[in-house]
């Protein structure tokens, strides 16, 4: 048996529900769909972060970007 969840809406949430139910879906179905989609997006984002962190960084090119930016900024004040 499924649990019942109660939410407190505000005007922004009500407008979003209006959009999600515009084609005839019930509020309950729209909320279930939105929760599932949000979880999928969060899982995809976490998977992408993990993939990026596993990527090889390559060899350093010997350029100190911070020093380059600082040098350019010092030249701007003149």
Image (spheres, rainbow, N blue to C red):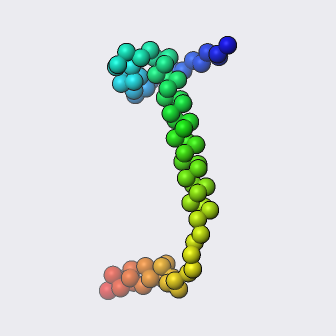
Give residue 73's quadrant in the image: bottom left
Count the labels in the image: 0
Note whether residue 51 is visible: yes
Q: Could you tell whether 54 is left or right of 76 in the image?
A: right
Identity of the residue drawn at 59% across and 18% down: 5
Give residue 10's quadrant in the image: top left
Image height of 13 relative to 71, above or below: above
Residue 22 screen position, x and y as percent: 34, 19
Image height of 39 relative to 4, above or below: below
Q: Could you tell whether 76 is left or right of 40 in the image?
A: left
Q: Residue furthest right?
A: 1
Identity of the residue drawn at 41% across and 17% down: 25
Residue 1 screen position, x and y as percent: 67, 13
Identity of the residue drawn at 46% across and 22% down: 30
Identity of the residue drawn at 49% across and 26% down: 33
What is the quadrant of the C terminus in the image?
A: bottom left
Residue 2 screen position, x and y as percent: 64, 16
Between 76 and 42, the residue placed more toward the observer is 42
Residue 75 screen position, x and y as percent: 35, 85
Q: Could you tell whether 22 is left or right of 4 in the image?
A: left
Between 62 and 23, the residue placed more toward the observer is 23
Note whether residue 15 is visible: no
């Amino acid at each position: 048996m499924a649990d019942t969840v109660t939410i407190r809406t505000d005007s922004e949430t009500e407008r979003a529900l209006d959009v999600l139910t515009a084609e005839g879906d019930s509020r309950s179905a729209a909320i279930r769909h939105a929760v599932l989609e949000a979880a999928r997006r969060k899982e995809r984002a976490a998977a992408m972060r993990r993939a990026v962190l596993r990527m090889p960084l390559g060899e350093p090119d010997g350029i100190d970007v911070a020093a380059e930016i600082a040098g350019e900024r010092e030249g701007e004040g003149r």
